[in-house]
Image (cartoon, grey):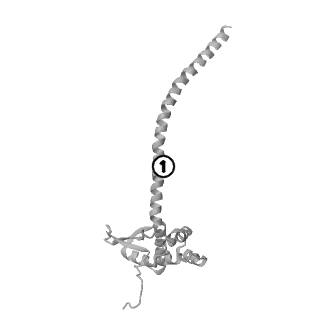
Amino acid sequence: MRHQVSGRKLGRTTSHREAMFRNMVVSLIQHGRIMTTLEKAKELRIIADKIVTLGKKDTLHARRLAFDRLRSRDAVQKLFGTIAPAFKSRNGGYTRILKVGHRHGDGGTTAIIEYLREDVGLINLEEKQAKAAKAKPAKKAAAEPKAKKEAKPAAAEKAKKEPKAEKAPKAKATATKSKKKDA
């Protein structure tokens, strides 16, 4: 019987399972959502919620514990800087699991695990900033061809004028050379 035995082994050794969940939590923190199997997502939710709760403390000891569990400075900075402050008023339940369907190869049930977007304005802010960053260069790119189009006629006019100007001095130079030869 399985009385009081918590957690799934997922057919892996303890060290492999710990490393896998460490990588998955770091990916979840960095990207805001990841796609995996339903069983892994359910186990990951437990670990991810505990990490966010740790991040809400925001002490040096909590940062060191988070780094010990995550092994990624970038993930720890994002956890304490943006994710945990967004959940200050919430007591648990920081993630949601959405069932996606079945994997094509082996038929495994897939799911998306993500931080709650209503509470985490950071994900929406990041998406808005990314869209704004993409939109700004597009406007600049649209403005640049107009400037280039306007510059091309002016450059063409200069090019037309310059060869005429260059031909005249060459002709004079050849005339002076022929005068020297004659003399």
Question: Looking at the picture, does residue 78 appear above or below residue 181?
Answer: below
Question: Looking at the picture, does residue 99 appear above or below residue 183?
Answer: below
Say whether residue 104 is left or right of residue 181: left
Q: Which residue is located at x 40 percent, y 74 percent?
A: 41
Query: What's under tag 1, amino acid-wise?
Result: Pro
Q: Give residue 174's quadrant in the image.
A: top right
Q: Quadrant of the N terminus?
A: bottom left
- In the depicted view, which residue is nearer to us: 58 or 7? 58
* SS category of the residue bearing label 1: helix
- In the depicted view, which residue is nearer to us: 60 or 40? 60
Q: Which residue is located at x 53 percent, y 76 percent?
A: 56
Q: Quadrant of the C terminus?
A: top right
Give percent across and percent down for residue 11: 40, 79
Pick out the residue farthest to the right. 183
Q: Which residue is located at x 46 percent, y 53 percent?
A: 134
Give percent across and percent down for residue 139: 46, 47
Question: Looking at the picture, does residue 133 appear above or below residue 143?
Answer: below
- In the depicted view, which residue is nearer to us: 39 or 96? 96
